[in-house]
Amino acid sequence: MKTMRAAIALIAAVATVSACGQPEFHYVRDRAGTTYFKVPASFSQLDTEPLELLISGDDPTSAATQLRKERVWSTAFDQAAEPNVQHMFGSREPFVYVTVHALTVKERNEMSLDRMRDYILPVTDGRREAYVMSQLQAGRAPLFGNFEPLLDQELTLDDGARGIRVRYNYRIVGGVQTFDQTAILDGKGTSLSLMLITCEATCFAERAAELDKIAGSFNLLRLPG
C-alpha cells in the first residue's frame, strides 16, 4: 500500500512539474524594448512581412520598403487552427497585431487622436467617406461596410503618453467582424505603438473578458535614464 501511495505521489508530482513547465503566455517586447504585451500561449506567432506590404502598398524592392523596415516593428498572433496573416481582416478566431512606428517629423506634426483612430482602418466619418469614394472611383465595391461604433475612449498615461482605444464592427464578405484597437503615442511624440485585436463579432462577444486582458496588457515600458 505504501508503495502504491508513493507511486501515485510521484506521478502527481511529475504531472505538476509538467504543467508548470508549459508557459501560459507569450511575453513580448518590441525591438527597442519600449512596448510590452502578452498573449495566451495558444496563439501562434506569425511573420508579418506580407502583412506590412499589404498595409503599406509598397513595392517589396523599393527604397520605401527598406526604410519602413528600419522604422516599423510588428508582430502578429493567430489562434486559428491554420494561422494566416490575412485573418487580420476576417476570421472566426482571435487575431492580434501589434506594431511600433518610429515617427518621421512630418508624421509627428500630423499625429492626432483622429489619426490614431484611422491608423489601420477608416474609423472617423471623413476617412470612411474617402475610403468608399476611392473604392467606387476605382470600380470596386468597398470591402468594409456597415460600420458600427462600439467604443471610443481617450487614454491618458504616465510620462505624458496619450492615446485612444476604439472598438467597432465592419461587415466583411457577409460576416460581421469586430476590431478593437489601442494606439499610444509616447510622451516625446516620437513613436506610436498600436495593438489591433479582431475576430468575428460573435467570437468577440463570447470571449470579451479574455480579449480585454490582452488589450489591458498592452503598455509602454519606462526605461531607465
Image: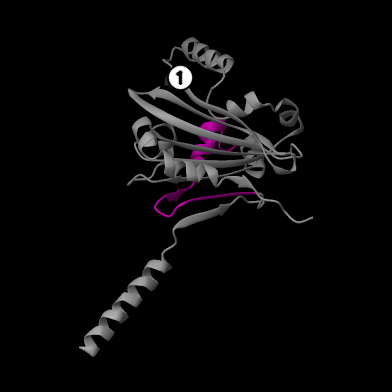
Residue 165 visible in rendering? yes
Q: Residue at x 53, y 34 (%)?
A: 181
Q: Is residue 139 left or right of residue 64?
A: left
Q: Is residue 151 left or right of residue 154?
A: left
Front residue of 17/147: it is: 17
The quadrant in which the C terminus is found is: bottom right
Q: Position of residue 6 (x, y in %)?
A: 28, 85
Q: Residue furthest left?
A: 1
Residue 63 visible in rendering? no
Q: Position of residue 109 (x, y in %)?
A: 75, 27
Classed neighbour count for the residue bearing mark 1: other residues with Cα under 10 Å, few (<14), some (14–19), many (≥20): some
Front residue of 7/174: it is: 7
Q: How is the image coloured?
A: one colour
Query: In which quarter of the view is residue 195 placed?
Result: top right
Q: Residue furthest front?
A: 1
The quadrant in which the N terminus is found is: bottom left
Q: Is residue 7 left or right of residue 77?
A: left
* Amino acid type at mark 1: Phe
Is residue 198 rendered magenta in the image?
no
Q: How many marks?
A: 1
Q: Residue at x 41, y 50 (%)?
A: 43
The span picked out in magenta is: 35-63
Residue identifier under label 1: 147
Is residue 60 rendered magenta in the image?
yes
